[in-house]
Amino acid sequence: MHDIRFIRDNPEQFDAALARRGLDPVAGAILEIDSKRRRLQARLQEMQSRRNQASKEIGALKSQGGDADALIAEVNDIKQQMPEMEAEENTLAAQLDGRLMELPNLLDDAVPAGDDEDDNELVRTHGSIPGFSFTPRDHVEIGEGLGQMDFALGAKVSGARFVVLRHQLARLERALAAFMLDLHTSKFGYVETMPPYLVNTQTMTGTGQLPKFAEDLYRADDKWLIPTAEVPLTNIVAGEIVDADSLPLRMTAHTPCFRSEAGSAGRDTRGMIRQHQFSKVELVSITTPGESAAEHERMTACAEEVLQQLELPYRVVRLCTGDTGFSAQQTYDIEVWLPGQNKGKGMYREISSCSNCGPFQARRMKARFRDDNGDTQFVHTLNGSGVAVGRAMIAVLENGQQEDGSVQLPTVLHSYMGSDRIAPA
């Protein structure tokens, strides 16, 4: 959400910032609503003040035996007018909040201009792309060849874009999540947290999923299934004034994630790349404005460490203006190399997004801290995948595949799996 005071003081700058996202100017329309509301608020304050003053005058006149009928009529008239004006003010406030809630975050100056993922900026690469003496298979061929990945059964019990994993692949899902949690808690100091998987509308609104992305979410009665653990973890500080000495707060959680993928019809329909239910280890940081840029770099490095220890080649890209998400000021995507994609030619695919949201979510959630001067400021919130477990499995299978159909596992997973490879069941 945006600060209306900034828009009042900088309407042209605000519209220019939205133009970087390809949006039309809105400051004028917003300020028109704001101006009407402020005039109405001022009038209501004047009427309230006059009512109070007249009430005192009525009391004084009556105590002196004077005639207070005119003042009483004036007070009654004010009382009759105020409810209608208050209702109008509430309507204008709702309209203003509604307009502000629909607008995305303003982008950091470092975000490159561009229309889509093709215009993202390469930041760095890590690792060597593996070579094979055979044409690499994708994870679907590998998993079905192992007899441990069943999309037909997933479709039978749930529908398209679901899978059933068995035996060592089911264990691999668990092992990857445990490895990631152990790394983030023991090495990087994130606090492991187990949040609810169902949240209320206010919580979804706080992190920016609502109202804009309702069609991408699943609903259960009056609750929403989380699309990512970012939602409940970030909202832990909603409505709070956090002790500055406790910042940064760093939390991690392994949860299922539920997404309808309403806007991705026809994309990634094969395999586990894009499913309605998947699991992810999430990283969330709550920090001060002065530290959020450094925290963004740190969080990205934490996610990269996962792939480094899994011995997976990857690259980091900075998302362009046309590809940066609704709530983010700036985002780094980490893209892992998947040799079995693109008909065995291989390609990079996103496995983590790490975003600095600045005060955007905090303003929606009313999450603040008290600075050294005793004043309250909005915290800055950051989130990142540390990493998507299903896509990590895909990467382990495709990069570790052997010609005989088995899969060589990264060394760091041997103790979790009790084996150095996965063989047909």
Image: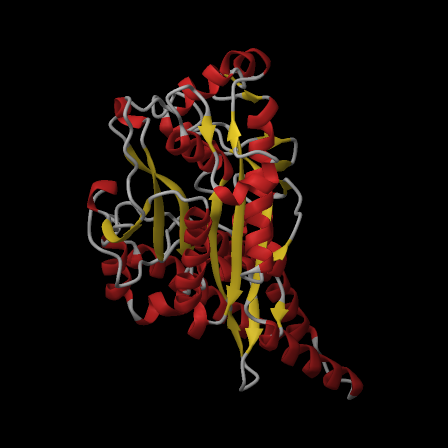
- Residue at 55%, 17% in the rendered image: 154
The N terminus lies in quadrant: bottom left
Q: Is residue 20 positioned above or below 411 on the image? A: below
Question: Is residue 76 or residue 165 the one in the foreground?
Answer: 165
- Viewer-side residue, 8 vs 258: 258
Residue 81 seen in render: no
Q: In the picture, which quadrant includes the C terminus?
A: top right
Whether residue 400 is visible here, answered yes or no, is yes
> Could you tell me residue 284's position as x and y percent?
53, 56
Figure quadrant of residue 337: top left
Q: Residue at x 61, y 70 (%)?
A: 242
In front here: 364 or 395? 395
The answer to whether residue 204 is left or right of residue 32 is right
Where does residue 254 sit, x and y in percent of width and height? 59, 44
The answer to whether 154 is drawn above or below residue 353 in the figure is above
Answer above or below: position of 50 versus 106.
Answer: below
The picture quadrant where one finds residue 300 is: bottom left
Q: Position of residue 344 (x, y in %)?
A: 28, 24
Q: Position of residue 163 (x, y in %)?
A: 53, 21
- How many numbered marks appear? 0
